[in-house]
Amino acid sequence: MNKHKLFSKLKIALIFLFWISIWQLIYILVDKEIFIVSPLSVFKKFIEYLRLPEFYYSILFSFIRIFSGFLLGMIIGVALAIIASVNKLLYTLFSPIITIAKTVPAASIILLVFIWLKSAFIPTFISFLLVMPLFYVNTYKGIAQTDKKLTEMASVFGFSKLKKIKYIYAPSIFPYFLTAFSSGFGLSWKSGITAEILCSPLYSIGSNLKDAKTYLETSDIFLWTAVIIILSLLFEKLSLKIIEKTFPYMRRKNLETEQYK
Amino acid sequence: MKLNNINKNFDNFEVLKNFSIEIKDNKTTCLFGKSGCGKTTLMNIICGIIKDFGGKINLPSKKISVIFQETRLLPWFTVAKNISIISKKYLYYLNAVELLEFQYYYPENLSGGMRQRLNIARALSYDFDILIMDEPFKGIDLTLKTKIMDFIKSETKNKTVIFTTHDYNEAIYLSDEIVYLDGPPLKITKVQQIK
């Protein structure tokens, strides 16, 4: 490991330690376990939960529900953006739906969908509904921002449609796609868990959180929250690594977005 | 190749007004004129980038290659990949413009002159019948310029070449015919036979 990497890892560890200390300090100042628990008791709870099969089932099923909604939102959002870029009439047609999907509060949709769907499908649907416009808007923007001079060059050199997509459009859209991917991932977890809390499907992180709140198990609330954060970050990093490995050249240039520097 | 009564406006600004010209086949024609007189617009019409114009072009259906004024390289690909997606003989062309050792570089890591050389190599690597060069030697240093001009000459034997410049030495060195232009709107002031 080189010096720079070591320093960067040390910096992350120090930042982590700093915030854990702040947490511990607040715990000492408040001194009431019902309001705030210590980092140590959350860690103990975590070790305790690791022995329970329900812990893994809850994580697995929540992940399946939320991630399937995320994937569906990604596929449909990208597909609609491509269609809307080709046909301006369809773009105008989709606009009100996208605006509504972007602005309606997740809780309103959850309550409405609660009447329509089985509770197990609600987190998937909510996750899909919140992520889809994000992919749609970003992909559409990526297509619109594609450098016209490059597409003209491609026409001069007789690129086929497929070649234009592969060599010009896809790399141009990619930074926008990654932005949607990163923010969408967090959003799908947040909205999916909220939906689980409200509709309590069997084996879910959300219903565990709801139970913890009902029985005033503050350490459980902290633990499940930490699990959500860790899972969301872990899977986001993992997915981005897979994308990077699959399309290495797409990480280069068109790097106006801060995230890709 | 004949262009008859070509008209092109940008908003209300007339760049081409009833402009006509005949380009000789298998010869190198230089369109010589000051910056902003409308040469690039004319080139863009000939190579099909500008499609909304008035008038008629009598262009044999042949393959056109272009050395663009702005390099138009794909920033996400290496030097080699920028050409290899057009021609399998990319190493030969990279060598000719002295970019072989930079083949794994990305355009953003090249100087302006190097990017222009890559632009030239890409255009020459395309299997063309007509070559259009719009200010092709911008940023290329003098020592390399002559070498690249000689390479272009050798690659364009018996092919139709149209190029713009405002450097008289380039015009004399490469052309069979120089068409002097003024404008806008673009007009021919003189035609000079060189060879």
Image: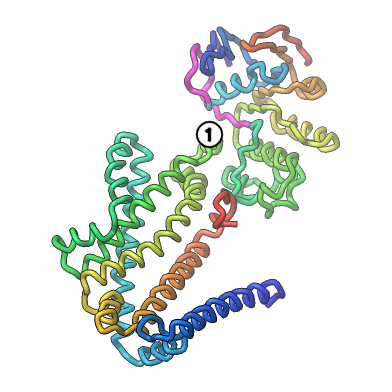
Left or right of residue A201: residue A6: right
Q: Chain of mark 1?
A: A
Residue in front for this viewpoint, B34 or B28: B34
Q: How is the image coloured?
A: rainbow
Left or right of residue A112: residue B65: right
Residue A83 falls in which quadrant of the image? Answer: top left
Residue at far right of view: B143
Residue in front for this viewpoint, A50 or A86: A50
Residue visible at 20% across and 61% down in the picture:
A111
State the image coordinates of residue A95 (x, y, percent, origin top left).
31, 41
Residue identifier under label 1: A152
B64 relative to A235, above or below: above
Residue in front for this viewpoint, B195 or A186: A186
Residue at far left of view: A115
Left or right of residue A18: residue B178: right
The kind of residue on which mark 1 rests is: Glu
Residue visible at 72% across and 9% down in the picture:
B191
Q: What SS does tag 1 mark?
A: helix
State the image coordinates of residue A49 (x, y, percent, origin top left).
35, 89
Q: Is residue B67 visible?
A: no
Q: Quadrant of the C terminus of chain B?
A: top right
* Label total for image: 1
Q: Is residue B81 visible?
A: yes
Residue B52 in the magenta stretch? The answer is yes
State the image coordinates of residue A32 (x, y, percent, origin top left).
39, 85
Residue in front for this viewpoint, A247 or B15: B15
Residue segment shown in magenta? B50-67
State the image coordinates of residue B194 (x, y, percent, origin top left).
78, 15
